[in-house]
Image (cartoon, grey):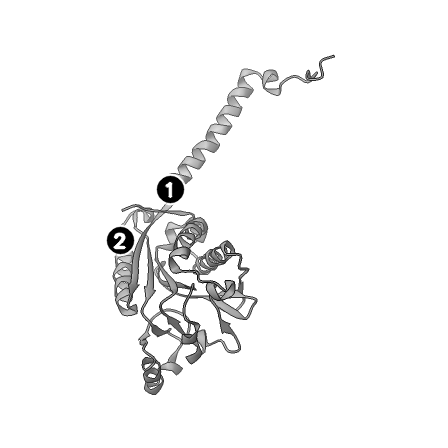
Amino acid sequence: MNLFQSNESDPIETLNDDHIFLRILFKLKIFLKIILKQNMCSKIRVIDLNRLSYNTALYIQQKLFTKVQQESSSSTTTNSVPNYLLLVEHEPVYTIGIRSKQYLDEKFQEKLQNLGADFSITNRGGLITFHGHGQLVAYPIVNLKNFPIIQNSIKKFVCQLESTIIDVCEEFGIKSARMNGYPGVWVDSDRKIAALGIHCSRYVTMHGIAINCNVNLGWFDHIIPCGIENKSITSISNELNKNISIEQVKPLLLKHFCEKLECKIEKH
């Protein structure tokens, strides 16, 4: 008796030509869907500004924001409108959002400026925060309609940005999560490792996320970050007790950003 011989016939051999044709056609349709999805995948232009003052980066943001809005209005297909992702490490600056009227006191601003930091008022959401050396900031200037996974929802967009940060932290073995009612990403529910603030108009976004890599956490001691009391600020380096640079984090951020928004980097 041949132990390697089966009494069962090969299912392919038992199929007639019509069945084989249908199976091939089915697999071909799946293959074409994959190819079509790849070709329709939104592209994003990454611009690395390296180290730059906040106000200069804000000027660039506003120019690109206006450009995307104008092209979105005139284009017949949103997919033809470019999307941008700015990466930057700011010179020390405290920024306040549109809900931060309590921080407009001149003496308070002067106190922060005496520390060696700039002070800037922005149109993003959120309250006061700090940007500076050792912090990776990413500004997506995109048309939400270009990303089907977002479903034209700013809430879904914010959720995907938070998921991007969570996955970046996971790469370093840091367990982080979002918290209801508190934008950004947190470690153990009491240490904020990344901030988030978005402005959106006519489906086009600006401002973005800030991941603390090896930033000097002492800068945050002079404010109540994002107006949240009884919470602290942390960084990737602080959690691991070793230095993790911005350059180590950049490729991971790009990788997970593209995964979460189902897009790819456009070479230009």
The residue at the point 34 percent across, 70 percent down is: 123
- Mark 2 vs mark 1, CA separation in Å: 19 Å
Check the image and report above or below for 217 versus 252.
below
Q: 166 or 197, which is in the foreground? A: 166
Query: Residue under circle 1?
Result: 40
Q: Residue at x 29, y 57 (%)?
A: 69
Amino acid at pointer 1: Met
Q: Is 141 placed left or right of 218 in the picture?
A: left
Using residue 220 as the reference point, say whether residue 92 is left or right of it: left
Residue pointed to by mark 2 = 71
Disc 2 marks a residue whose amino acid type is Glu
The residue that appears at 40% across and 69% down in the rendered structure is: 125
Residue at the limit of the structure toward the top, as seen here:
1
What percent of the width, then of the height, locates residue 257? 42, 53
Please identify, in this view, whether the residue under mark 2 or under mark 1 is nearer the observer: 1
- Percent across and percent down for residue 26 are 51, 28
Quadrant hosting residue 118: bottom left
Q: Which residue is drawn at 49% across and 54% down?
A: 171
Give the image location of residue 255, x and y in percent: 42, 50
Picture layout, residue 236 above or below residue 224: above
